[in-house]
Image (tube, rainbow, N blue to C red):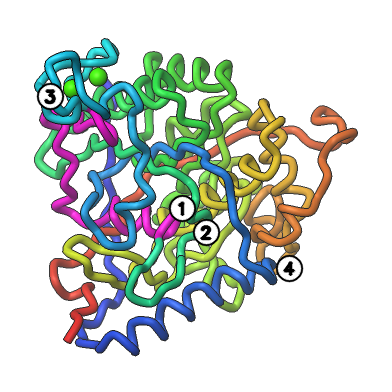
Amino acid sequence: MRYIFIFIFFYSFQAYAINHLESCKLLKQNSNKFYKWGSKEKVTSQEVIVAVIDTGIDIHHESLKQSLWQNPGEVGTDTNGRDKRSNGIDDDHNGFIDDVNGWNFVNNNSQLQDQNGHGTHIAGIIAGKNSFCGEAFGVAPMAKIMVLKYYHPLQNGQITLEKSIAAMRYAMQMGAKIINYSGGGISPDEKEEKVLEQAKAKGILVVAAAGNEKSLADSEPYYPASYNLNNILSVAAVDEKFQLADFSNFGLINVDIAGPGVKIWSSLPGNSYGLLSGTSQSTAFLSGLSALILSQNPGIVDPQEVILRIYMSRQKVSSLIGKTKFSGVANVGRSLQVQAEGHSLNGGYTHSFGLMKNWFVPSGKNSILFFK
Ligand SMILES: [Ca+2]
Ligand SMILES: [Ca+2]
């Protein structure tokens, strides 16, 4: 029996009201935080589908509604002139009725609302745009988010695992190139390993949070982290000073790289925005970066090449030596410039994996920045 441990991490959120101008200033800071990792210019990206397997997403959020994946088989009108989105028919015969933007595996329907906030925050980091400030703040604003809701706090661990496996299958079936993945447990599961192998065979990159237990992931392995699959990128979190975040897991073998994960500003349900911290957040940065790499290099079919580019272009950081396999943080600008062709994936670069799923959920309204 596999147990899923869901870890909830509360950063020291402060409730405070801000006006629009202040919010835009924060948004800009967040962009700067991203660009500080190496990108000097705004990068536009072609459409790459990123499956966010999470708590759902506020699909009406001003920053996200233009960044949603649309199932082409569930839009338009059917032969009776009805809107395929809401005709109650599985128009594309994929086994899911009216799955326009994804699927809710918790309730087995097409309602994708995010009562938690986590998924909305993650989606914003990956592909958020903000209509009010007129500026995108997500890493890959042109990426398309496939919304796959699998987590509910009242659902037991085994069911959560089954839902996450079903969500991964959907992502594979419907063309996702990247899976942004959270959650995990301390024992392996055959079905989960198999579906991740299938994802690898289909060339899907799985970007996964390293976890928030401050623990050495090499001696305390987590699954699916420790499956030996080279299409998984596991991500630790650093603060603005490139120091490993005090909550972040680490491990020379089982944690690959770090990304920004402390006090990250992004979307929250109800057209709100707020700060959250965690390896979930840094993972979302890496998913966005991977989407940028894929969109600029549509010829890449092997997720290992994406990982290799991130590895080759990383910013080495002394405090991360011995803490992560790549001894550094992702560097966005260099990742987009590096030419990985001609480098053997087998020479000097081997990959073993570690990941753990974690959740950084807002503590109710305390984490939300209220607009005046
Ligand atoms: Ca369908
Ligand atoms: Ca339909």
Q: How far apart are marks 2 and 4 (CA)?
A: 25 Å
Q: Distance between the residues labelled 2 and 3?
A: 36 Å
Query: Within 8 Å of ligand 1, the CB of disc 4?
Result: no
Image position of 213 with respect to 178: above or below: below
User: Is residue 91 rendered to the left or right of residue 308?
Assistant: left
Residue 318's tag is 4
The answer to whether residue 255 shows anywhere in this view is no
Q: What element carries label 1?
A: helix
Query: Within 8 Å of ligand 2, the CB of disc 3?
Result: no
Q: What residue lies at 16% left-to-right and 31% top-to-bottom?
A: 110
Image position of 160 with respect to 329: above or below: above
- Foreground mark, 3 or 1, reads 3
* Residue labelled with disc 1: 284
Image: magenta residue range: 99-128
Residue 139's tag is 2
Which of the two discs, 3 and 1, labels the residue nearer the N terminus? 3
x, y (%) of residue 332? 66, 59
Q: What element carries label 2?
A: loop
Q: Tags 1 and 2 in contact by the CB under 8 Å rule?
A: yes
- Report which quarter residue 149 is drawn in: top left
* Residue labelled with disc 3: 82
